[in-house]
Image (cartoon, rainbow, N blue to C red):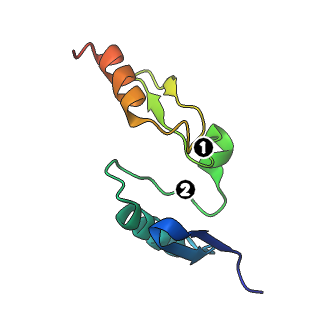
Amino acid sequence: MPGRWRSNVRQNVLFTDPRTFVERSSVAESCVRKLGIHIPALVDDVSDAVEAAYTGWPDRLYLIDREGRVAFKSPPGPFGFKPERLEDSLRAITSVH
């Protein structure tokens, strides 16, 4: 059975749903490169365990403090994807100004 196609035509990103972690990692690398993402990107396993735990879909930014608590959780993307808000929270918890 063929996989579903996903795309972002404007940025020339087109792929089928990956079935393995290796395939998913390859898609993530391609998206990071083609979309010009300049922050670290992590790849969830194919069971989407992290997405289920943190409701990270479609994209979301989290800051985990030194005690392991969520110190910042952005609204869902794409409209909530604002790295500068994460930076402000990081500065606040580290007292870097």
Q: Residue at x 44, y 21 (%)?
A: 67
Q: Residue at x 39, y 21 (%)?
A: 89
* Picture quadrant where residue 55 is located: top right
Q: Which residue ends up furthest to the front in the rendered image?
A: 10
Q: Earlier in the sequence, mark 1 or mark 2?
A: 2
Query: Residue 91, percent across and down?
Result: 30, 20
Residue 8 marker: none
| Residue 82 located left or right of residue 51 | left
Quarter of the image for the C terminus: give it. Answer: top left
| Residue 22 located left or right of residue 49 | left
Work out whether 96 lies above or below 30: above
Residue with the mark numbered 2: 44
Alpha carbons under labels 1 and 2: distance apart = 10 Å
Q: Secondary structure at mark 1?
A: loop
Kindly identify the amino acid type of the residue bearing the numbered disc 1: Gly
Tag 1–tag 2 contact (CB < 8 Å): yes
Q: Which residue ends up furthest to the bottom in the rendered image?
A: 1
Q: Which residue ends up furthest to the right in the rendered image?
A: 1
Q: Residue at x 50, y 66 (%)?
A: 10
Residue with the mark numbered 1: 56
Q: Is residue 30 visible?
A: yes
Q: Residue at x 54, y 70 (%)?
A: 9
Q: Residues within 10 Å of mark 1 (few under 14, many from 20)?
A: some
